[in-house]
Image (cartoon, coloured by chain):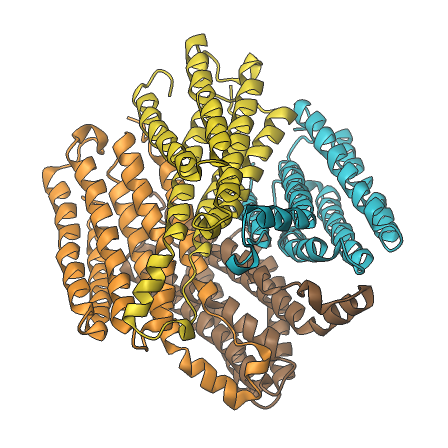
Chain colours: A orange, B yellow, C cyan, D brown
Amino acid sequence: MEKETVRIENFSDAVFAIAITLLVLDLRAPEINMVKNGAELLVFLKSEWTTYLAFTLSFFSIFIMWVNHHKIFKQIYSRNTAIMFSNGLILFLVTAVSYPTALLARFFNSEASSIAVAIYTGIFVLINISYNLLWFIASHNKKLLRPGITDSAIKKITNNYLYGFPTYLIAFGISFQFPAVALTICMLLLIYWALSSGKINMNKNED
Amino acid sequence: MEKETVRIENFSDAVFAIAITLLVLDLRAPEINMVKNGAELLVFLKSEWTTYLAFTLSFFSIFIMWVNHHKIFKQIYSRNTAIMFSNGLILFLVTAVSYPTALLARFFNSEASSIAVAIYTGIFVLINISYNLLWFIASHNKKLLRPGITDSAIKKITNNYLYGFPTYLIAFGISFQFPAVALTICMLLLIYWALSSGKINMNKNED
Amino acid sequence: MEKETVRIENFSDAVFAIAITLLVLDLRAPEINMVKNGAELLVFLKSEWTTYLAFTLSFFSIFIMWVNHHKIFKQIYSRNTAIMFSNGLILFLVTAVSYPTALLARFFNSEASSIAVAIYTGIFVLINISYNLLWFIASHNKKLLRPGITDSAIKKITNNYLYGFPTYLIAFGISFQFPAVALTICMLLLIYWALSSGKINMNKNED
Amino acid sequence: MEKETVRIENFSDAVFAIAITLLVLDLRAPEINMVKNGAELLVFLKSEWTTYLAFTLSFFSIFIMWVNHHKIFKQIYSRNTAIMFSNGLILFLVTAVSYPTALLARFFNSEASSIAVAIYTGIFVLINISYNLLWFIASHNKKLLRPGITDSAIKKITNNYLYGFPTYLIAFGISFQFPAVALTICMLLLIYWALSSGKINMNKNED
């Protein structure tokens, strides 16, 4: 059976690659007249630490999402309208990540910190839902999946994404009161996924 | 017979992917000194609803165009100058979509609303013409098409695009008087294409 | 003999696709406070005609360059340092096109018109030289070329690019005195290449 | 044995292509009211020479990095978490290059020159470390490498990257005192790699 989803995957990969690279446009050099000498340039650059934090966090978040997207589509062989548009929703949200990133960069170190972090964690809640939706659609119609996929492999992927949802939801809830804690949870989840993604990669049966 | 259009399709896919992702550059975070606290940030973000509307509408419009582009090129096996340049025209217009999108985002909720919507619906009229042109060229020269394609399959695709033209033209005409109605028609057409694209996908004979 | 240049071609295609799509970033919507109503929006948009002209001209120029790039690399099977870096030079110049395009957009209708057009035609002179350089390197080392390529095919491609160089040089020279004429020459050359590229495409022997 | 790294390579290629093309966004045309005539436009363009220098240097630096990335991944056949994330680190830093490039463009010809050049050379130190890290991980686990790769081929690649690290470190150290010298070292290293990359390309045994 031929895999029908190759062009969707290539298009998705391109969107991920562009979205991840466009993040850099939010790192802006100061205007020439704002900085008189090297010391002032260093002061300016240090004051921009929230921008670097937001850029780094979003870069590796999208990177992990891309790895996970790859992993899900390795199991999807056919497509239908629901697959197409739940994938379209993922791409829409991944593309949009640069906006909350810019808000986080500018307002994390301000009075508006809690709202900026809530929006930032909020988009990851939505992205998590969209991944669960894609996998829910795919895993509930075995005709769409790789021939010969085992139920335990399906369950393993299902579990991998289910953990993310409540965690991001907790981060979202916390962000209104303790924005720094909420952001730390996002980073820890990122590290967890980086490590767990590795383990699945190594196990050839599910990969 | 070898398919000659692979590199054109890959190039077109890349242009679609970039055009769809660049739309996000119009979502701009407020400057740090425009917003004092979380409440003001929320007020600012709410006032930007036309930007989100324009971004969402254009994202899924380009997404549907990409799906349709894919569908047409699955039937085209050879290329000639006319195919190359009618496809170039499609890419030109798809790339340009971000400009009317920015106009819509800024002026939908202003005195200039009708002109902004007219330009926005106008570019979709032009894109629709360019798709019809591409398919007209391809379907009137059977040497360009997939060997063994049936006349009913050709006709089905022809019809699928013909409906769009008068509808967008009506939306364009209405937009001068009732811009909100015109935009609603664009959204409904999007949903119609999303669903109908699915049906053709499911039917393996034409796909 | 395996074609060694696939990854170079894919990378080049991506750069062409991004460069052609980024051109749109120079079409900028007016700020909300610059325009009070639909009539003023139309006046603003009309005043931007040089931007549309520059965008359109550069879009189709890069499109034709991409077609020609494809055509040359269909004949190149091996790579060496000279191929890699003459191709890198082409990509560098193609990427840079958006800068003279922005100059043309802003200054074609100003006192600085002749300089803007001279720079614009000047970059096409350079791009033409870089294409001739790539083809010179490839065609003077038959080991780099497609096995079985005929001398007449080589000569045909050589001639196709040679015409461009003096024409762009003339346009460059004229632009200081008659910028509008110089730009018209660029457009005519574009149309000539669009048509002649078609003819080579149709002829299966060289393609 | 099947190569498992194809999708990683394609994704990386896309990120390289986008990062290299986005550099052009830092070439900005003057506002229309800043320039009255052709002579003033020329004066403005000449004053922008640091921007052209930074753009050119970064473009060819990323281009060489892409060539080297290609070369390393030709030898890597399997992937694990460490490969994935050391490659992610490379992509992160390559994407970020546009920021030090913008700093260099604006401040090379100012009092802040030494800091701007130190940051610029600094990112190349980091990129060099990330390449060495990727190759260290790959070359210390023969299961990850191309079957049949010889120890001398591994050593040759190892050496090729080792030279870069101390050189960039020296450039970084010098930049605080003699920024122009530091930048010249970067350029010479670029030329060295362009030429040496060629030699490895020519030698079919390692390629």
Does residue B129 appear left or right of residue C175 in this picture? left
Q: Is B169 in front, or is B176?
A: B176
> Is C106 placed above or below C77 here?
below
Q: Single out the residue that lies furthest toward the top.
A: B151
Task: From the top left corner, tell me how far across and down residue C90 is, in percent.
Answer: 66, 51
Task: From the top left corner, tell me how far across and down residue D4 is, in percent.
Answer: 34, 47
> Is D61 placed above or below A86 here?
below
Quarter of the picture containing the C terminus of chain B is: top left
> Is B83 placed above or below C111 here?
above
Q: Is D165 in front, or is C159?
A: C159
Q: Is B182 in front, or is D191?
A: B182
> Is C50 placed above or below A136 here?
below
Residue appearing at x 65%, y 43% in the figure: C56
Does residue A206 appear left or right of residue B35 in this picture? left
Does the rendering let one see residue B39? yes
Q: How many marks?
A: 0
Q: Is C90 in front, or is C192?
A: C192
Does residue B205 appear left or right of residue C152 in this picture? left
Does the rendering let one see residue C2? no
Residue appearing at x 45%, y 25% in the figure: B167
Residue A122: quarter of image: bottom left
Task: From the top left corner, tell me how far across and down residue C132 is, in percent.
Answer: 76, 46
Task: From the top left corner, tell me how far across and down residue B38 is, in percent.
Answer: 28, 70
